[in-house]
Each structure stands twice: as structure tokens, then as C-alpha cells.
Image (tube, grey):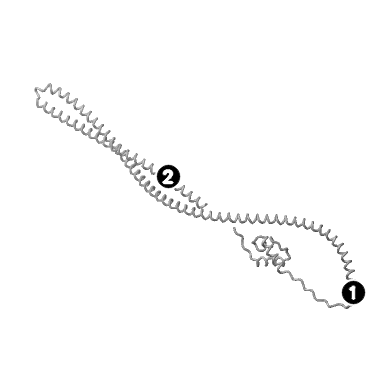
Amino acid sequence: MRPTEVSDEQIIQAGLQLEAQQSRVTGFALRRVIGAGTPARLVAVWNAYKQSNAPAPAPAEDAPPLPGDIEPALKVATDQIAANLRQLVITLHGHCQREARTKVVQVEQEADAKCALYLEELADASSQIEKAESLNDSLERQCQQTGSDLSAANERIAALTGELAKANERLERAAAELSKAREMEEVARQAEQQAVQASQQLERELEDAKQAHAEDLGRHQEVLAGELEKRKVIEGQLANAEVTRDAVSEQSNSKSLQLASLEAKIKALDDRLLDHTVRLDEQHSVIVSQRQTVGHLERQNERLNEHIAQLEQQAKNGDKA
């Protein structure tokens, strides 16, 4: 990331502000005031400004001429002073050289220590700047990625919302089909109950018919036995009572016809019972098929409920994301 440009006027104003606060003007102090720029450039601009604005030395004024008798005395005194001063200067120069060498060593040591400290501070500051720039780049990438993720999440939520609406429609249709199937099952159950009741009624009627048939058959057998006995008597008297035999024969034929009629009624009842049994089997098959359909619809409804729960969970996860 490119650092922010700092003008020379900003650097000079920051240096003047630090001088007004009686603070030492350094590159890091200037950067702390300005909030941008590299310390090396900041201090270089400030030093150039100070050098360009340093006060010029005052020009020497012309001295008036001395009288003629003072000039030789002044020259002798000057020479003597110059010799003494030279000796003093030589002595002082020796001491100064020794002090200077000692001072230079100290200054160099101090300068080395300060330079090392400044280098450490510079390295630390540069590292912090690089970390800040890297963090800023990372945050920008994260913001871009977050924006992309948010757009994708919104698209996913819209898709899930459409799927949820379709699933709700399918659920409504399945609920309607299930309600219709339950109504059909209720109708089939009622039909089954009616068929069972009709079957029970037919069984009762059949039992009654059988019982009536048995009673009629018993009565007819008793009558037939009596008629046989009478027939034996009549056969003994047949030669003398032809008219009586014809009457007995007609009565026997009538009883036979009644017996045949009862047998026909019993056969008709058996046929009705068989037909009703077939219809009960068909209704039972229909009921079994309807129950299978209802079971299939219930399983389909359960799958739809599970799918809707999954879609709602995905939608919640998308909202959280």
C-alpha cells in the first residue's frame, strides 16, 4: 500500500510546533505530529529548512587608524601577546586535543549507542508500519470476501426461499390429497361397516331361512311320514277307494311342489350370500388399496416435512452466516 504524501510545508509547521513546545525535533516526533510520512524524509526536510534559515554572520566594521607612536608599541605588545598566546594556544591545543579525543570517543560511543537505539526504533517503527499496512490489506481483502460471501448468502437465501415456497405448495397439495384420502378411507370404512352389517344381516337371514327350512322340512317330513302311513293304508284300501288315492296323490304332489319351492329359495339365498361375499372381497381389496395409498401419502408427507425442516435449517444457517 502506497504511503500518504506529506508536503514540506506540513513538515516545517510540525517542526515549528515542536520547537514552540520546547521539544526535540526528530523524525519520529515529526511523524507523531503529522501522522504520516517516513521519519528519514521528515527530518531531512526539517534540517534543510533550518540550514536555509540560519542567520548570516554580521560584517566587520572598518576600524579608525591609530597614531604613529602607538602603532609600534602596539605591534611589540601584540607580538609578545601573540607569542604568549601562541604558547598558551599550543598548550591549550594539546589539552584540547586530548580532551577532544576523549570527548570524541565518548561522543562516538554515545552516538553509536544512540544510532543503535535509533536503528532499533526505526526497525520497530518500520515493522509496525508494515504490520499495519499488511493488516489494512488483509482487512480490505476480508471486506471484499465478506461482501462476496454476503452476496452469495443472499442469493442462497433467495433460492432457499423459492424452494421453501415450492415445498409449501407441495405440502399443501399433499395435505389436500391426504385429506381426500382420509375422507375416502372414512367412506371405505363406513362402506366396510355397512358391508359387515349387511353380511351379518344376510347371515342372520340365512340362519333364519335355514331354520325355517329345517322346520318346514321337519314338518314336511312328519307330514310325509304321515302321508306314507296314510298311503299304506290307502294302498290297502286302493282297490276300494280310487277317489281317495287320487286326493292323496294330489296332496303329495302339492307337498313336493312346496318342498321344491323351499329348496329354490334356499339356493337363491345361497347365491345372494355368495354374491355379497364377492362384493365384500372387492370392497376389502379397495380398502386395502386405499390404505396403501394413504400410507404412501403419509410417508410422502413425512419426507416433505423433513425436506422443509432441512430448508428452514439451511435458511437459518444462511441468516447466521
Density class for disc 1 (Cα within 10 Å; few <14, some 14-19, many ≥20) is few
Nearest to the eye among marks 2 and 1: give it.
1
Q: Position of residue 14 (x, y in %)?
A: 68, 66
Q: Residue at x 65, y 60 (%)?
A: 38
Left/right placement of residue 243 relative to residue 144 reads left
Q: In the image, what residue type sits under mark 1? A: Pro
Specify the quadrant that holds the N terminus: bottom right
Name the residue tied to disc 1. 72
Question: Which element is circle 1 on?
Answer: helix
Q: Earlier in the sequence, mark 2 or mark 1?
A: 1
Q: In the image, what residue type sits under mark 2? A: Arg
Q: Position of residue 224 (x, y in %)?
A: 18, 26
- Residue farthest to the top, as pictured: 236
Q: Residue at x 13, y 27 (%)?
A: 249
Q: Which mark is residue 179?
A: none
Q: Position of residue 172 (x, y in %)?
A: 39, 50
Instruction: Relative to 254, say whether 110 is above or below.
Output: below
Q: Are marks 2 and 1 in contact (CB under 8 Å)?
A: no
The residue closer to the viewer here, 214 or 116, is 116
Q: Which mark is residue 303?
A: 2
